[in-house]
Amino acid sequence: MASRVLGTALFRSGFTVQDAPKYGAERRGAPIFSTVRAARGTAINERGVIHNPDLVVVADDTLLTVPAAGILQGLEQGAVVLVNSRESAETWQHRLNLDVQLVILPAAAEVEDRAELPHIGATCAGAAASLLGVIAPDVLAAAIGEELAGLGELVVEQNRRNALAAYRAVQDKKGLVREGKAVAAGDYTPPAWVELSVDDVGIAAPDVRAVANSVQVRTGLWRTLRPTIDYDHCVNCWWVCSSLCPDSAIRVENNTPIIDYDHCKGCMICVGVCPPHAIQGEPEYLAQQREAQSADTGAGDNNGTDTADG
Amino acid sequence: MSEIISRMKDLPSAHLLGAGTPMCSGCGGLEALHQIYDVLGENTVFVNAAGCMTLLSVYPFTPFRGSWLYTAMASAPAGAQGVRDALDLLIQQGRLPPEEDLQVVVLTGDGSAYGMGMSATSGAMDRGLDFIYICYDNEGYGNTGQQYSSATPHGAATATSGGTGGFPGYKKDLFSIWAAHQPSYVATVIASEPLDLAKKIAKARDMSGPRMIIALSPCPTGWDYDPRESVAIGKLAVKTGVWPLKEYENGTVTHTRIPRERPAVEEYLKTQGRFSHLFRPQRNEALLTEIQQRVDRYWAQAQ
Amino acid sequence: MEPILLTGNAAAAWGARLAGVDYVPAFPITPQTEIIETLGAWLDSGAMPGRMVTLESEHSMLTAAGAAAATGVRVFSATSSQGLLHAMEMLYTVAGWRAPFVLVNVSRGLSAPITLEADHNDVLAARDSGFLQIHCTDCQEVVDSVLLAYRLAEDTAVRLPVMVNLDGFYLSFTREPVRLPDLAAAREFLPPFDPGSMRFAASAPQSQAVAVLGGSPYSYFRYETHLAARNAISVYQRIAAEFESRFGRERGAVEAYRCDDADIVFFMIGSFASKAREAVDRLREAGRRVGLLRPRLLRPYPAEIIASALLGVRGVAVVDQNISMGQGGVLHTELAAALYGRGSAPAILTSFIGGLGGREIAPQEFFEMAEVTFRAVDEGRSPPPRLLYTETELRELRKLQSVALAEREQTSPAGRATP
C-alpha cells in the first residue's frame, strides 16, 4: 500500500513511475516488500528488484537484523534508510554499522489492535514523501485519497492524518534522498556465469529427502503479538491449546504446554481458547523490551520462553 | 497407531507436522491438517493438488515426516491411484516389505474438491481406491485471494462476488455427492472440534477403501476476521448448525453432534467481514432469513 | 523368431509385454484403444503379470502413470490426439518429476474440426514438455522402440519419460510382418527397473515435486531436465548400437537412406517416410541423386548427427505432416534452426505441408517435391512453403461446401446462403 501511495504521489508530481509489490509464497502476516521507481520525464526501462536503492523504507524494524530478509542489500554510500522504530538512529547505526543515512520514523503508540496495522503503510509513505523532497503535502493527501478510495472516507481520513503527521515528523530531512544513477556500461563487473553440470537425478529433481525441516524457517518473525503462558494459572489442559495451535507451535512436555516462539506466528488463538485464561497476549515489541531488560538485570524470565528448535 | 481416542486427554500430545510453514497466521486448514497428521502419522504419502497447501513444501523445506507428492489441481486422486497401485505391486512382487507400506492421503482445497478435481475424485471412488481424501474447505479460491468457488456459501462476499447480495449461488453439498458414490466413509470435521475430528480420522485410518473427509477451514484472510477468532468462529459454525458434523458409513448418515439449542446463524455470520454487507449499512433481512431458513430446513430434515 | 503379422497397435502392446511393465494406467481413444484392449486381455488371462487401471481421463491417466513411476514401478500408457492434449498439463508435470516411463502416442489430427486420421500436430504439441520422442515408420520399429524407450527413460543419466509415436491408421491398424524379440533376449536387453532414490516407502520418506520460490532454483531444475534430455542423444546411440548387435536391426537416432552421394534429401518423420523411401528408389532409377533423412529421435533433437548426414547435400525437401499456425511446418523451422550458421549446411530448404488429417501423399508428389527442390538448388533460392493440395481436391471441397450451404437453405429458412 505504501508503495502505491508513493507511486501515485510521484506520478501526480510529474514523474514517470513504476511501482510493484513482490509476492512470495507466504501468507498474510509474513514479511512483504514492494518497490517504487521514479524518473523525470523519461520512460523507466529497468524492472523488478531495485539492486541499489536510494531509499529503503522499513515498516517492521525486526526485519532489519534478519539476513534472509536482505533489506540492506545493495545499499550504497549515502543511501537513506527510513526505519519505523521505537529505537533511536544511534542504536540502529551502532547495530547495523553501515555507511548510510538512517532516519527514524518514531513508531506509533502500541498497536494492540491488528486492525490498526494497515495504517503503517500510509505513515511510511508520508515520511518517505518528505525525504524525497519532491512531493507536496497536498499531492500526498490526494494520492492517499486515490489509493484508498475503496476503503471508505473514514479510513482515507485516518490514513491522511497519519501520513501528513509522518511527513512533518521528518521535515528537517526533506530532500535527503538523492537521485540515483543508472548502471554504467563502460566499466562493469561481468557476471560470473557458470556451466551447469549434469547432476545426478537424485539431486537434480525438486525432491526433499529431509523430514520436517520446515522448522528451519523461523515464522516467529511474523509475530506482532505474543502469547505468554502464565504457568501459575496453567492447569495443564495442554490438549486444548496445543491441539488448536494451527502451527504445531505449542509442544507438550511433562504434561505442560510450551510455546515455540521460533515459529509462533502470533495468531493468538491460544489466548482465546485457554480455559483458565492463563495465556496472555501483548505486543511483541513490549515482550522483547521486557526480555532485554530482564537479560540486563540477569533475572531470568521463565514464562515459557523457548528459542530452541521446535 | 490404533490407540483409542475418546476424551480430549486422549488427543495426541506429540505434534508431527513441522512448524515453519508459510500458511497464514490463524489458518483453520493448517489447524485441521496438523491434528489429522497427528492421528495418521508419518507412514503416509500426501498427494497434493494446487491450492494454499501447495506451499507447505517449498524447496528445500517440508513440514512432513512422511512423504509428499505434488501433482496438479485436477488430478490428485489419480496421483493417489498411481502411488497406491505401485505400492501394492511392489509389495505383491516382494520388492517392498509390507511394513514399508504407506497410507495414501489426498490433500486438496475446496477449489479442487468441489470443482476441478471432482471427476478425478469420483473416478477414484468408483474404482474403490484405498485412500483417504482430506479437503480443507475455506469456501473459496483462497490461494488466489478468495474468489468464489462452488464451496462458497450463499451471500458471502468474495473477490468475485462483491455485490450487495454477495455470492448468488449456494454451497455445493459435497458430502452428499461423495456419499452418493457409496465409499467406505465420508465425514465432515472442523479443527475447532478436535475430539470429533480425531475420532473420525482414527476411524478412517483403520478402514480401507475410499475415505473422504471435508474439513471446514475458517480462513482469516478470505473470510476477513482477526486470526485469533478462528476457533471461536469454527465453534459457532457447528453450534449454529451451519456446519453439521456428520459421517456416512454403510449407506447411513449419522450426525456426530446435534446442536440442540442452535443460536441464530447471524451470530456466526456477523463474526466475518465477508458477511458484513448483510448487517451494514442496514440489515438485509430477506437474505438473513433465507440463510437461517435453509439451516433450519436442513436440521428439520436431519432429525 | 519368425516374423508374424501385427498391427502397429499390437506391436506397441507387445513392446509393453516384452518390457515386463508392471502397471498400465489407461484411457480409450481412437485409434489407440486396441493397445490397451490387447494389454487388458493379456493381463486378464494371466499371460502377462501386472495391473491395468482405466482412469476417468487422460489427465488422470498421466498423473497416475507419473505417480506410479515415481513410486518405483515400470509403467506403460498410451493415448492419442485429444487425449494427449487433455493430458498436456501432466506431460510437463511428470517430466519435471523426472519420472521415467513410456507413453505410446498414436498420432491423429487435432480438433477442430475433429477427425480420426493421422498427422503430427498432437505429438509435436508435446515437443517442449520434457518427454523424449521416438518416431516410428513401421510396425517393427514400434515394438523395437518401446524396448529402446524403456532403456532410455530409465538410464540413470537420463531419467525422463519417453514417448513412442506411431501414426494412426497407417501403422495403428495396419498389419505388417514383425519379428518379436525373444522374451529372454528382451529381458536381457532391458533389465528390471531400478528406481534408485525415487520411490515412496515408510523408511525412506521424501517430498517429491515440491514448489520452488524464485527464478534461480526454478532455472536450475528446468535446465537440469534439459541437460538430461541432451544427454539422451549419446545414451540413445549407445543403446541403439547394443540393440543392433543383439537383434540385428539398425535403430540409430537418425535414419539416413541413400544420403551418401545425394544432391537432395527428403526430411520427414513417421510412417509416410517409408513412402519417401520408395520415392527415393524410383528417383534413383530415374537418375536423380536423392536420399531420405529421418530422425527417429526428435527429442532430444540430434542436430549434430543431422548436420553431418547433410554434408554435401545441396537441398532438403522438408515434409511436415503438421502445421504451426502462422509459422508453418515445425520440422522445417527446427531444421533451419539446427543448420543456421553452419558453413557446410545445404543452401536450400524447401518446405512442404502434407498429410494433414491423414491426407495421402502420392508418389508423384514426392517426385515433384524433389524436382521443386532441384530447381531451387539451381536457382539458389528457396520457394515459399507449399501445401500439398490438388485441383481435384479443391473441386471436391467446393462441392462439399455447396452441399453444406444447400442443406442450410433447406433446413433453415431464416438463414440465407451468401450468393
Image (cartoon, coloured by chain):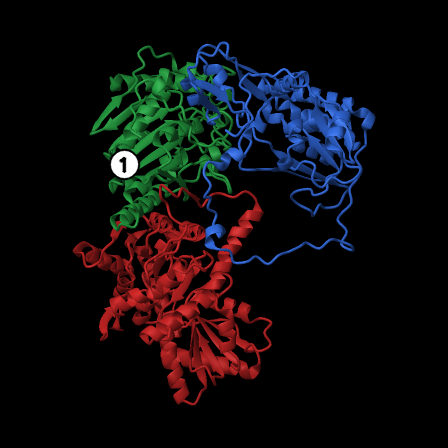
Chain colours: A blue, B green, C red
- Residue A154 image offset from top left, x and y in percent: 63, 18
Of residues A297 and C87, which is closer to you in this image? A297
Q: C407 left or right of A293?
A: left
Kind of residue at disc 1? Pro
What residue is rendered at 65% in x and 27% in y?
A: A62
- Residue C258 image offset from top left, x and y in percent: 42, 82
What residue is rendered at 47% in x and 58% in y?
A: C128
Task: Residue at the far right: name it.
Answer: A172
Host chain of mark 1: B
Q: Quadrant of residue B105?
A: top left
**Residue hosting label 1:** B210
Residue C405, visible in the rendered structure = no
Task: Residue at the far front: name it.
Answer: A298
Decide: is B251 above or below C253.
Answer: above
Of residues C70 and C184, which is closer to you in this image? C184
Residue A228, visible in the rendered structure = yes
- Residue A229 image offset from top left, x and y in percent: 52, 15
